[in-house]
Image (cartoon, helix red, strand yellow):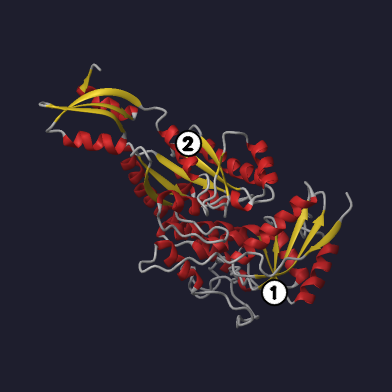
Amino acid sequence: MTESAAHISFPDDLLEAPESTPTTSTPTTGELQLSERASLQRVAGLSTELTDVTEVEYRRLRLERVVLVGVWTEGSAAAARANMVELAALAETAGSQVLDALIQRRSKPDPATYIGSGKADELREVVLATGADTVICDGELTPAQLTALEKVVKVKVIDRTALILDIFAQHATSREGKAQVSLAQMEYMLPRLRGWGESMSRQAGGRAGSNGGVGLRGPGETKIETDRRRIRERMAKLRREIRGMKKARTTKRAARRRNAIPAITVAGYTNAGKSSLVNAMTGSGVLVQDALFATLDPTTRRATLDDGRAVVFTDTVGFVRHLPTQLVEAFRSTLEEVVDADLVLHVVDGSDAFPMEQISAVRRVINEIVAEEGVAAPPELLVINKIDAVDATRLTEIRGAVGTEAAFVSARTGEGLPELFERIREFVGSSDVELTIAVPFSRGDIVSRVHSEGEVLAADHHADGTTMRVRVPSAFAGELAPLAVDA
C-alpha cells in the first residue's frame, strides 16, 4: 500500500459552547460544577517551565498549541477524518488549541516512529511552521515510539491514552474518581518513566547501602529504580483504597435491591447526551456540558413513573473507541453499575456521522466487563438521542440500521420522552404479579409500599380493613402471600 499524508483543517469553534441556561436563585449541582470548571482555564504562552531538566520527567502534559497526527490503516476516508475530528475534540476538551492535523495512509503504524522516518521529518516541518509545542498521536504509542518521535520533532509527543487520562484528571471530582484516575495514570506512566542524561542511573552514595564502607558496597538502587518502586507502592495503596470505596458502593446497591427499586443505568458513548437525558427524565441538576467526558462520577437519581412506580437512574462515565485498558481496570467499580443494572439505556448520538461505530465501541467494552465478571449481560434498550439535530432522511437511515426496538428522543426538546417512559414502564412491569390482598387497618405500611413499589388496580374498604387488587414485583408478591385472598 502506498504511503501518503494529508492535512486536515479544523474551524476555531470546533466545540460549540454550551447553551446558556437561565440563572435561578438556587443553582443546581451541575451548574456549580460547570462554573468551577470554567473558573480555571489554561492560558497559552505563559509557561515558565525550565528547559534544562535534570531530574525524572513524569511526562506532565503541557497542552497549549498542538498538532494532531493519525495513521489511516482501514476504513473509508470519511471514517478516518471522523476519527481525527474526535481527537481534536478530545484535545480541545483538555484545554489545548489545535493548529493542524495530518493523516497518513499506511498498512500499519511504523514500529519505530509510528508514522515512519520520512513523515516524521515532514511533521517536524509542520511543527516549526505552526509553532506547536505538542504533537498528539491518534493511537497508543509504545515507550520506544514516543522517544524516537520526540527526537525527530523535538517537542513533546503524547498519545491518545495520555490525552484521555489528562481529561479524566481534570474532570474527576469525587474521592473515588480521583483515586481511579491516579491509579490509571501511574499504570500508564510506569513503563514510560524516563529521565535526561545520566540522572536516572545515579546510585545511592555514602552509607545508604548500610552494609559497610568503601570497598564493601555493591551496586545500589538507581534513581529510576527508586521512582518505579515508589510508584508501585503508591499504586498498591490506591488499589486498597478503591477496594474499600467499592464496598460502600456495593452496600448502596444492596439497599436499593432490598427496597425492590428497579435500577436503570444510562450508558453510552461520550458526549451522547446521557446526563441531559437523566436531567430530562428526573428533573435533577446533573452536570451537563458540551464536552467529552464531562461526567466521570456516577450519579444516581430517583424518578417516579406515571403509574407511581419508583425507579433510579444512574448516569455513568462515557465510553470511547480504543478506551485505554488502564481506565477500564481503574474504573471497574464504576462500570459495575452497568453490569448490575436491571436495564441499560444505551444512549447514542443520532447526530454523529457514524452512530453504528459508537454502538459497536460501547457494546465491546460492556461485553468485556460482563465476560470478566462472569455474569449475564443486562437487557439493553437502545435510545437514539439528539433527533432534533438530524434531518428526516438521515433519521430514516438510522431507523433502518438500528431496527424498530430503539427509542428516538431529544433530551433538549423533550420529543419522544413520553414514549421512552412508556417503554421503561413496560419493562419494569414485565415481571409483575397480580394478586388480591386483604390488608387490616393496622398495616398501613403495606398500603404505602404497594403504592410506592407497585400499582393499585382496585380497592374496597370494609369494616376489617381494605381489600386491594394490586400489581407488584414478584419479590414483593412473595412478602404479600400471607395476605392474599381469592379474588
* Image quarter of residue 356: top right
Whether residue 259 appears in this view of the structure is: no
From the image, state whether disc 2 or disc 1 is nearer to you. Answer: 2
Residue 310 place in picture, x, y as percent: 34, 41
Judged from the image, the secondary structure of the residue bearing numbered disc 2 is helix
Mark 2 and mark 1: Cα distance apart in space: 51 Å
Direction from residue 32 to residue 42 in the image, left or right: right
Q: Position of residue 476 (x, y in %)?
A: 29, 30
Which residue is situated farthest in the right direction here? 2
Quadrant of the rendering where the C terminus is positioned:
top left
- Around disc 2, counting alpha carbons within 10 Å, would you say few (fewer than 14), some (14 to 19), or many (20 or more)? some
Q: Residues within 10 Å of mark 1 (few under 14, many from 20)?
A: some
Residue at the spot 86% in from the left edge and 57% down from the top edge: 4
Where residue 23 sits in the image (x, y, percent)? 43, 69
Quadrant of the rendered image containing residue 433: top left
For this view, does 203 lie left or right of residue 127? Answer: left
Tell me, for residue 423, which label it has, or none. 2
Q: What amino acid does circle 1 point to?
A: Asp
Residue at the location (44% across, 39% down)?
Answer: 341
Q: Is residue 165 above or below residue 98?
A: above
**Any part of residue 265 in sight:** yes
Residue at the farthest left position: 463
Please name whichever residue, 272 or 370, is drawn nearer the observer in this view of the structure: 272
* Residue receiving disc 1: 133
Image mark for residue 110: none
SS label for mark 1:
loop
User: Could you say which is closer to the camera, residue 10 or residue 93?
Assistant: 10
Amino acid type, mark 2: Arg
